[in-house]
Amino acid sequence: MAASSAALSLPKVFRPVLGLGRSGNPAKVWAAAASCRREKSTFVGRIIPPPAKYGGRHTVTLIPGDGIGPELLNHVRELFRFSCVPVDFEVVNVNSSVATEDDIHNAITAIRRNGVALKGNIETNHNMPPSHKSRNNLLRTSLDLFANMMHCQSLPGVQTRHKNIDIIIIRENTEGEYSSLEHESVSGVVESLKIITRYNSLRIADYAFRLAREKGRRRVTAVHKANIMKLADGLFLQCCKEVASGYPDIQFDSMIVDNTTMQLVSKPHQFDVMVMPNLYGNVVSNVCAGLVGGPGLVPGANYGTNYAVFETATRNTGKSIADKNIANPTAMLLASCLMLDHLRLHDYANMIRGAVLTTMNETRLHTADIGGQGTTSEVVQSVMKNIQSGRCKN
Amino acid sequence: MAGNAWRSTVSRVVGAMKSQASHPRTFSRGLQTVTLIPGDGIGPEISTAVMKIFEAAKAPIQWEERNVTAIKGPGGKWMIPTEAKDSMDKSKIGLKGPLKTPIAAGHPSMNLLLRKTFDLYANVRPCVSIEGYKTPYTDVDLVTIRENTEGEYSGIEHVIVDGVVQSIKLITEEASQRIAEYAFEYARNNQRASVTAVHKANIMRMSDGLFLRKCREVAENFKDIKFTEMYLDTVCLNMVQDPTQFDVLVMPNLYGDILSDLCAGLIGGLGVTPSGNIGANGVAIFESVHGTAPDIAGKDLANPTALLLSAVMMLRHMGLHGQAKKIETACFDTIRDKKVLTKDLGGNSKCSEFTGEICRRVQDME
């Protein structure tokens, strides 16, 4: 089976990689790192989706979140019901305004139970005291969703300054600048720690290269700032180089983050697959989302070894357009298609995706964020009509 | 006792007035000395070009050329040559070309040395679309003000255990206050309508939270300028879709680095972007941020636009708005005409021809 052979091939990749490291005894470091992981999972491997339960129906956790999340996820549920998709949603509400973390822990338990989740963004009020951590971040780190994958593709029906963009961005999702480790050592002086570990850097680099190989991509670019942060980003870059040596068929290069953003706005076609630590990933993914048409068009996926959570790529709450029926449902609908792909329900995924893209490209029912005057419900109705008539472009 | 208190009050008031008046300065009479650091690679050619254009415009500037290299001072610390430092301390204004950053030379980069020597805490980069140099983005007119001394670039890193590295991002109340105050003063002096603080306080609660708090406090004293705050990712998203919605942006070091280069990319790259560094004690060094381009050095092919626009920024800083406008208009007109352009702008003229054309236009405007 493909899954087990992939899992078996991994240790072979990593034995030489660990041997190349300058660390004292690679086996010891590896064992120490591996034993401290809570899940006794194999290193990456193929992410196995949870099996369908009774009647062949999957249960997926649904976290509505704030802002436009609830209305868009309602549309997703409506669409799934209409298309007879064998997925049941377990809704877990997370109230972002309370100080206790019970809600988010309930959500995490639900995701552990079901294995897969579809979520809207949970707002983080940054005016609350620092002990009130970001709920989204807590979810990602508790479930160890180490890879955030975003595929930016220009949609033919959308007017943008740059055409034919096709970039995959892989962003480390659990550490880096988002470690939430801060302290005020002296009054008026705050230190925030950015953590980079060998384990996570190797993991994300390997994920990037395997994905590139699977999708037939030619180049992986590592984005970093190792000229300034010599140790931290230097370690990340070194790990990427080590993993790259195990994939001779894929070209590897690196670029400094400020140059990357400059190149993205002038010549975005030079990029293929990009891999980077957390904060640069945030910047680059938002720039790329802007290049292809905005936050309403791009879906994102967070993968861990045992869990997967799907959401919009730019993670916006959209408070200002909530409940006005003007939000663009495309990103959330495409995210739900990614989820269906993960559950191996490829037929349903392709059907819905085709219908969404047909709506986007041919019937031109654009919402306000991409320059049109359509409403959310009009778009969803059009998608349903396309599914019904079977008029889908795969 | 009362006499002492009165005297100290008077001196404090006079000092405050003087410091306010010193920035911007007006030099309606007499020559102002400016320390010129030509730099490496194409540095000397573009510096000569700028000097020629300023001469044609009859700008009241007296250039004092100095070179900066890293020398080891007493106590083993790396520093810049004393002549360069003294010249800068006296003139307070500097114009710098690109400096080579040697790899494995044992000393830190020259830019870092200059920054440390003169405590250059603010990096200002106005990004204005150049008519005639087509990019997919038109009507860009914003300024990025970046804190230049601390933040993520503090350089404090440790290996905790083998395989785990920590890098410390430092945010202090003092530096945040200083940069916020500079940003609002700049907005006021240059008739800008709003200042936006860029942050990620939803994730970095304490550090960016402190930065944001300081910005809010300073905004209270500048009620005539609109203050908004925006997340870094939202800024990036909106910048790429509609850059016209931004005016002045103020932010910590790393975000500033990324955003200022992003904005430079919007208007056409580092070859046409001016930049200024403001330091404590009224020191200001204006520079071109592109590289030394060793492959075209000495061949009269370089494009002096970046250094020229930085020099124009310098004139504005000194209060010589008329001269600044004249030179800037001449430069933009030349680029818009598209008859005499250097290779990187899409033409095939030489640097000297481009310079000559700008000089001619400046003289015609008299």
Image (tube, coloured by chain):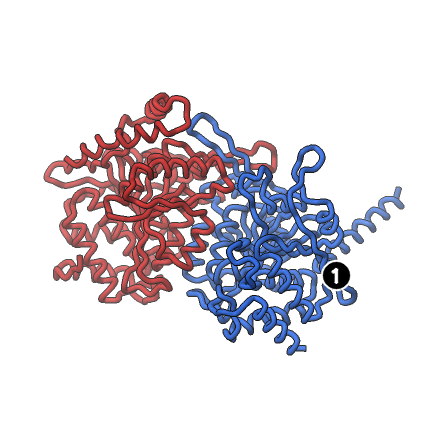
Name the residue at 24% across, 39% down.
Answer: A116
Name the residue at 55% across, 73% down.
Answer: B334
* Residue B175 placement, left or right of A205: right
Q: Do we see residue B231 in this rendering?
A: no
- Residue A194 locus on image (x, y percent): 47, 36
Q: How many marks?
A: 1
Q: Quadrant of residue B330?
A: bottom right
- Residue A52 locus on image (x, y percent): 15, 38
Chain A on-screen colour: red
The chain that appears blue in the image is B
Nearest the camera: A364 or B329? B329
Nearest the camera: A358 or A122? A358
- Give the quarter of the figure containing the N terminus of chain A: top left
Q: Quadrant of residue B65?
A: bottom right
Q: Quadrant of residue B26?
A: bottom right
Residue linked to disc 1: B32
Element at badge 1? strand
Nearest the camera: B66 or A207? B66
* Residue A366 placement, left or right of A49: right
Q: Do we see residue B236 in this rendering?
A: yes
Chain ID for label 1? B
Q: Residue furthest front?
A: B299
Mark 1: amino acid: Gln
- Residue B309 locus on image (x, y percent): 59, 63
- Residue B144 locus on image (x, y percent): 54, 55
